[in-house]
Amino acid sequence: METSTSTRVKEIFFIVGGTAIYAFGLVYLNIANHLAEGGVTGITLIIRALFGIDPAYTTLLINIPLILIGGKVLGKRSFYYTILGTVCLSVFLWIWQRVPLVINLDHDLFIVSLLAGLFAGFGSGLVYRYGGTTGGADVIARILEQKIGFTMGKSLLIFDVIVLLLSLTYLDLKRMMYTLIVSFVFSKVVDMLSSGGYAAKGVMIISNRNEEIAQILMDHLERGVTYIHGEGGFSSDLKKIIYIIVSPQEMNEVKKIIHTVDEKAFISISNVHDVVGEGFTYLKPQRRKFFLKKN
């Protein structure tokens, strides 16, 4: 199916914006405070420290063969978006290094490391979420995610550790430990942003009044429910278990509805990290409002 022009423009906008945020944090937090970085970006910082070559240039040079690999494995769209992300990262690295801005954090490396992780994770997370990468280890991490289901945040953390060990050639141990904080925060923020279109709660309900509860949930929340057929371990009674996915903001309302109908109902709630469909990533019908009365 063809991607609409508006969707493509939106994706490009966030990929460009994400690389700008990432490069900003790299220049004004990592480089300014002599902190390392993971992946190919970390390698460019090693080259900068040892040979004085601008990371804006080495980012492109190192990423060329990786982009070609990524293009063959990930397809045309990812190939183009990877080129876009890599070129934009180099451009913004070049720009930010020439803007005379100083972020004064009173030499507090802990705050610097937290902010650096947030900037890098938020910027990269936006790029990943909208189908792009910034080249380098990002390409390999995306391949691992698609082929074996290994999350990008975990893959990037492994790459980071390897590159950070190499960064000891120009960093002392103190700054290396702060850089590990950057990498940890980075991986968590990336996983949070790139995990899916919508975070939600999955609710399983076991009750002797399951059909009544299901009907009220469907009518009041305008969300569908699914019946899962189960059997009691002690009683061997056959039961229909209700399964419904709702937004976190609706959880209190769901509990109220269930307990109003059946105070003895058993409720199991789990985190759902990726939800795509009507009511979440698509527009949801206007809910009907009415009040429940306890029987």
Image (tube, rainbow, N blue to C red):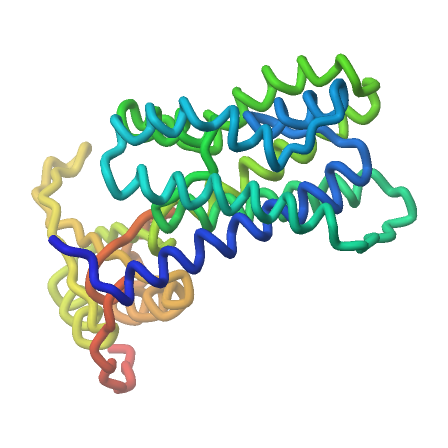
Q: Nearer the viewer, residue 212 or 63?
A: 63
Taking the image as shown, residue 274 lies to the left or right of residue 28, namely: left
Q: Quadrant of the C terminus?
A: bottom left
Taking the image as shown, residue 94 lies to the left or right of residue 171, namely: left
The x, y position of residue 247, in whole percent, is 35, 62
Judge whether 220 appears above or below 37 on screen: below
Residue located 28% across and 53% down the image: 275
Q: Nearer the viewer, residue 30 or 261?
A: 30
The x, y position of residue 292, in whole percent, is 28, 81
Q: Nearer the viewer, residue 13 or 175?
A: 13
Residue located 41% across and 22% down the image: 65
Residue located 59% across and 52% down the image: 21
**The quarter of the displayed image where residue 214 is located:** bottom left
Taking the image as shown, residue 189 lies to the left or right of residue 26, namely: left
The x, y position of residue 99, in whole percent, is 75, 54
Residue located 55% across and 26% down the image: 40
